Image (tube, grey):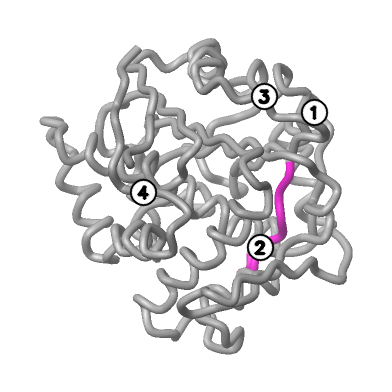
Amino acid sequence: MSATVYFSRTITPETVAKLYDRLGVELTGKVAVKLHSGEEGNQNFLGPEFWRPMIEQVNGTVVECNTAYEGARNTTQKHLRLLNKHGWSRYFTVDLLDAEGPDMVLENPEGKIIQKDYVGKDLANYDSMLVLSHFKGHPMGGYGGALKQLSIGCASSFGKAYIHGAGVPADIWTADHDRFLESMADAASMVHCHFQGQVAYINVMKNMSVDCDCCAVAEDPCMKDIGILASTDPIAIDQACIDLVLQSDDPGRDHLLERINSRNGVHTIEAAEALGFGTREYELIEE
């Protein structure tokens, strides 16, 4: 059975809210809004002004987790300072989920590579989640979208090393690459299923660099903006983004595809579908 993905070529804050409404989902209780707050020095991430109407509409709390690499977000103190510098703390309530331990552990015995996912313990305080993703390339995963936000994005600093290392944190940068991608799919499934249908996804195909928003030094965008997508299926929405890149006639398309394909990025989507929490088959409804 295919998923529904709504799509608009108009990229505005108002369009984000419009597509969310089309989903017909009412996120109840305390809403966590997972997004990428941007590494210091990165010029491509989508800032608080862009996301503000959507976050205010669901009365959400912006949530993030510390990184597992050196930079401006790998300790709670530095990360909170950068969240304020980038404007998130000025506009919204912000919760650094793993500001203090111990981690919350999600489990899925059916995970292919990892059966546990270490996430920021404050995730337990939320009833639903809105995942706001900036679709772009990524130095390791090939691309970044909804599945990466669920997995690496929601993982604590330790959890990020656990996923990257395919269950062995010490192997954070040396684990078999496909096992790392499959671990991301495992972790994404655990967060998605944790919210039991109280989760929605929006991907924005704007400022599409081959590099992620986690890069302090990132390439400028290599192709023209494409649009905004919304779905309740994180697998379908990421697949739809990949397909829209493939269908583009933009001269920068091949540069982005080289990044995605050289890292076998679509394998994360394949592995996620094999876990059964979504589908790569979708109907794209253009608004």
**Cα separation between marks 3 and 2:** 25 Å
Of the residues under marks 1 and 4, which one precedes in the sequence? Answer: 1
Gap in angstroms between the C-alphas marked 2 and 4 = 23 Å
- The boundaries of the magenta stretch are 63-70
The answer to whether 86 appears left or right of 229 in the picture is right
Q: Nearer the viewer, mark 2 or mark 4?
A: 4
User: Circle 1 is placed at which residue position?
Assistant: 92
SS type, badge 2: loop
- Would you name the residue on which mark 3 appears? 26
- Residue assigned mark 2: 155
Q: Would you place residue 14 above or below residue 70 in this image?
A: above
2 or 1: mark nearer the eye? 2
Q: Which label number is shown at residue 279?
A: 4
Residue type marked 4:
Thr
| Nearer to me, 86 or 26 | 26
Labelled pair 4, 3 in contact (Cβ < 8 Å): no
Residue 43 in the image: above or below residue 74: above
Q: CA distance from mark 1 to mark 3?
A: 20 Å
Give, as a three-letter code, the residue at label 3. Glu
Residue at point 64%, 75% (across, down) = 116
Quarter holding residue 132: top right
- Tell me how far mark 1 sits from mark 4, CA to CA: 33 Å
